[in-house]
Image (cartoon, grey):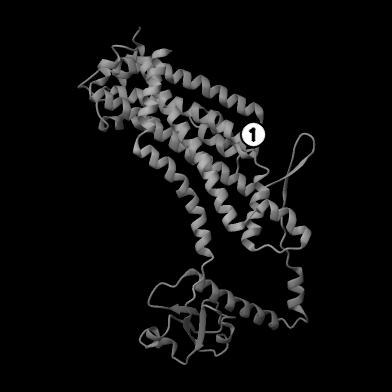
Amino acid sequence: MGKIGIIIRREYTTRVVKKSFLLMTFLTPLFFAAMIVIPLWLSTIKDTGKREIAVVDVTNEYAQALASNAVYQFIIVQQPAGDIGKSDLKNQFYAIVAISGDLVKDSSAVTVYAEKQIDLELKNYIANQLNRYVENKRLESYQIPNIKQIISSSQAHVKVTTIKLDAKGNEVVTSSEIATVIGGVTTMLIYLFIFLYGVQVMRGVVEEKTNRIIEVIVSSVKPFELMMGKIIGIALVGLTQFLLWVVLTGIISSVAGVAFWGNMSHLQTTAPMNGTEVTQSQQIALNMLSGLQGINFTEIAVYFLIYFLGGYLLYASLFAAIGSAVDNDTDTQQFMMPITLPILFAIYAAIYSIRNPDGPLAFWCSIIPFTSPIVMMVRLPFDVPAWQLVLSITLLIFTFIGTTWLAGKIYRVGILMYGKKPSWRELLKWIRYKN
């Protein structure tokens, strides 16, 4: 155990002091926070420039429906609809709206001309203005008294609130949307960690084997001890990076949240009492805060570590076996496909399981050890039954013990093999060799 500890310490210390590790560890939380904060900040910045838009309406009726605002100035011009492309309007205006027919009868009789692609906001603004006008025209044609008021009063916007009950009947407001997002994010993190650090194990073995350092190392330790020390050392690197990401992202997000929305918990308790109105951004933040209260983050974090370690140990041992069997990175491609296919399938299964986390696909893929570390993370925010978690983790433990044993038999033979790329048949022979 002492020799394995030395190898673990060597693998850990040599990686955590690398510039690439430090940059990824401290820049990634900033990147995640920037992905959230910058779009919100940019969305608050309005375009102060006014855009003049010409309206060519052959019906002389619908142009009046296009009301100008602080950004768009609609100007009615007289111009034959068929001559717009050759006219000087394109040089005088940002865009030209051409209405070539009665929109009540032909809803497609609207065309927007511009020298550059118009943005979606302008297109939607024009469409919404004309839609309301055409709808009113059609309602008037029915000649039913007060039809607008009847339709307006009959419209409903049902807001569904989800409540989770515990064993004692206590109520907690939850959010299916937030649970889905958390499941998707943790799934991608598991996938990235397993693949990224598993490949690091393989490349580390190939590098040591190519430099012939391995011959010196195995003279002091057994090949199996070397393999396990390398796998565990790199696993600790991954856990260190993940924990730092969690802490740094939490700090950055908290600071950004206070900067944008203030103290949401204080607003949530005081606003209803003093009648203070909240903005749309603050209301979104309040809804997110309420939904987050229904998520058991401690449980998710614990199972994340369990499935990360289980999935990593399962695949890292196989990656180590591949690295020991070849002499360079190019030769690894022959053996990578059977290992990467289950990982890729697990990602696709997780994506399709997001909408139905209790369906047959999600259930079986969260039980099968080669896919369970990834797919189970989608299901965790939706309260997986305890017996399924126990079964999934038990199978995962026994499977990674089995794969580690098989990988160890390949590793102890392949680590000292040079100059020959083995076939699958030779790998099977290595597994059958007796100690």
The quadrant of the image that shows the N terminus is top left
The answer to whether any part of residue 57 appears in the image is no
Q: Identify which residue, 222 or 409, lies in the foreground.
A: 222
**Residue 335 on image: x %, y %:** 33, 28
Q: Is 107 on the left-hand or right-hand side of 15?
A: right
Determine the residue positioned at 65% across, 82% down: 137
Determine the residue positioned at 77% across, 74% down: 150
Q: Secondary structure at mark 1?
A: loop
Q: How many marks?
A: 1
**Residue 44 on image: x %, y %:** 54, 65
Specify the farthest residue to the top: 435
The relative height of residue 296 versus residue 288 in the rendered view (above or below) is above
Q: Would you name the residue on which mark 1 appears?
A: 384
Disc 1 crowd, CA 10 A, few/some/many (<14, 14-19, 20+): some
Determine the residue positioned at 37% across, 77% down: 115
**Residue 200 on image: x %, y %:** 36, 31
The quadrant of the image that shows the C terminus is top left
The answer to whether any part of residue 77 appears in the image is yes
The quadrant holding residue 301 is top right
The relative height of residue 184 versus residue 130 in the rendered view (above or below) is above
Q: Is 76 on the left-hand or right-hand side of 337?
A: right
Q: Is 187 on the left-hand or right-hand side of 423?
A: right
The quadrant holding residue 411 is top left
Q: Identify which residue, 35 or 256, lies in the foreground.
A: 256
**Residue 256 on image: x %, y %:** 55, 53
Specify the farthest residue to the bottom: 78
- Amino acid residing under circle 1: Val
